[in-house]
Amino acid sequence: MKRIMLVCSAGMSTSLLVSKMEQAATEKGIQADIFAVAASEADVKLQDDSEKIDILLLGPQVRFMKSQFEKKVATKGIPVEVIEMKDYGMMNGSKVLEAALSVIEK
């Protein structure tokens, strides 16, 4: 089971992308827990060590926060990536999922 956390400014714009990513995961037979949170809520999720997050994906609108999140998760070994603007704009869940999995499986 892969846990993928998406972070955006309010947590709403990524909800459609989460649905598209879940659909792509189902079609590919991949078990994944994909969820979105607002940047302000991300710290709470990251402090909960009961369920390990495999990757943190930032929406393009919060790309400026990448270094902040990298510092927060440095000891947890969670990679932080920015979602490609084109894939985000097109809501291409399959491409975003593939990109996330390629980082997780390195």
Image (cartoon, helix red, strand yellow):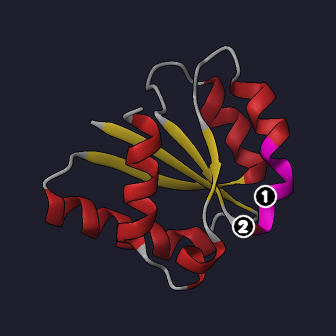
Q: CA distance from mark 1 to mark 2?
A: 5 Å
Q: Does 71 sit above or below residue 76?
A: below
Reply yes or no: does residue 9 show up in magenta. Answer: no
Indicate left or right for 20 with 6 as reference.
Answer: left
Report if the CB atoms under discs 1 and 2 are less than 8 Å apart.
Answer: yes
Whether residue 32 is visible here, answered yes or no, is yes
Residue farthest to the front?
106
The N terminus is located in which quarter?
Answer: top left
Element type at marker 1?
helix
Q: Amino acid at mark 1?
A: Arg
Residue that numbered label 2 is attached to: 60
Residue that numbered label 1 is attached to: 63
Indicate left or right for 26 with 71 as reference.
Answer: left
Reply yes or no: does residue 62 show up in magenta. Answer: yes
The C terminus is located in which quarter?
Answer: top left
Q: Which stretch is magenta?
A: 61-66
User: Could you tell me which residue is drawn at 43 percent across and 26 percent down?
Assistant: 51
Q: Amino acid at mark 2?
A: Pro
The residue lying toward the viewer, choosing from 65 and 12, is: 65
Q: Does 34 sit above or below residue 59?
A: above
On the image, the x and y values in percent for residue 13 come to: 62, 75
User: Could you tell me which residue is drawn at 59 percent across and 83 percent down?
Assistant: 89
Indicate left or right for 63 with 44 as reference.
Answer: right
Whether residue 19 is visible here, answered yes or no, is no
User: Could you tell me which residue is drawn at 43 percent across and 36 percent down?
Assistant: 104
On the image, the x and y values in percent for residue 68 come to: 84, 37
* Number of numbered discs on residues: 2
On the image, the x and y values in percent for residue 14 come to: 57, 69
Mark 2 Cα-neighbour bin, 10 Å: few <14, some 14–19, many ≥20 = some
